[in-house]
Image (cartoon, rainbow, N blue to C red):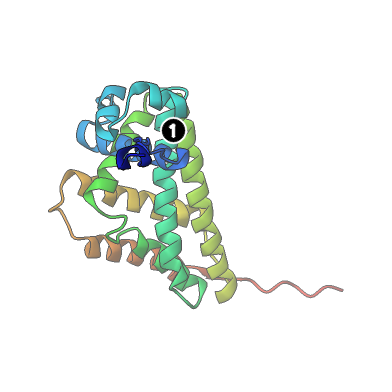
Amino acid sequence: MSGDAAVPELKKRRTRIDPELRRKAIIEATMQCITQYGHSGCTLERICAQAGISIGLIGHHFSSKEELMLSTYQALTDQLREETRKYLANQNGSSEGRLLAIIRSSFRGQIFNEFILTTWLGFWGAAVSSEQLRALNKKLYADYRKELEAVFNDIARENGTHIDAKSAALTITALIDGFWLEWALDHKAFSSKKAEKCCITTAQMFVKAAQPLTAMPPTS
């Protein structure tokens, strides 16, 4: 028997990528395209080129471009929430400390950077014309405000005061968004530290202006 015959022929094997990893790669490519071309210029062809895949493969994971955009926006929000949770995990202390940690995490490099904010800005613009995206945006912001509202209520309970938690949560959310928008348009307008300080100062104003709880009259 010849030596050549004893050696089995080697066959090339195709590398299979885990479906979840492929899905994440497509979403990441979508974020990259939104950053470069905006939502309106983020075509399936450009997403495919960025991800190095065919349009047919996108159709295997997402039923439509709209579903892909919704999934990407959800993934972006989940990413930001996860970074906030990581930051909070390293914080100890009162509810007021938790509030400050939430605000500070909004201006850290993992969140407060050109890629994240430009992508976020693209989705803000798209929500104007997309009913589904607008509905998702409404829910995500409602959840975020509810989380802030709960923290302000916890602070009030700890201090024995009353805080207009709804107004406080609305104000802080709008203020953070305003700084994100302004910085995305002009990186030199202010520093992240300045924006963080302004938001913290505003949050502390709500806490300091809180009214003491009125003692309940004795029951007969």
Which residue shows up at 44% across the image and 54% down it? 81
Quadrant holding the C terminus: bottom right
Which residue shows up at 52% across the image and 48% down it? 143
As helix, strand or loop, the secondary structure at mark 1 comes to helix
Quadrant assignment, res 112: bottom left
What is the total number of numbered labels drawn onto the structure image?
1
Residue farthest to the right, as pictured: 220
Q: Amino acid at mark 1?
A: Leu
Q: Position of residue 216 (x, y in %)?
A: 72, 72
Q: Left or right of 211: which side holds 128?
A: left
**Closest to the observer, 97 or 217:** 97
User: Can residue 20 be seen in this snapshot?
Assistant: yes
Q: Position of residue 61 (x, y in %)?
A: 46, 29
Can you identify the residue that label 1 sits on? 70
Quadrant holding the N terminus: top left
Q: Position of residue 30 (x, y in %)?
A: 32, 34
**Closest to the observer, 162 or 10:** 10
Residue farthest to the left, as pictured: 188
**Closest to the observer, 110 or 120:** 110
Residue farthest to the bottom, as pictured: 93
Q: Is residue 209 above or below residue 49?
A: below
Classed neighbour count for the residue bearing mark 1: other residues with Cα under 10 Å, few (<14), some (14–19), many (≥20): some
Which residue shows up at 40% across the image and 58% down it? 83
User: Can residue 130 be seen in this snapshot?
Assistant: no
Which residue shows up at 28% across the image and 66% down it? 197
Q: Position of residue 36 (x, y in %)?
A: 20, 35
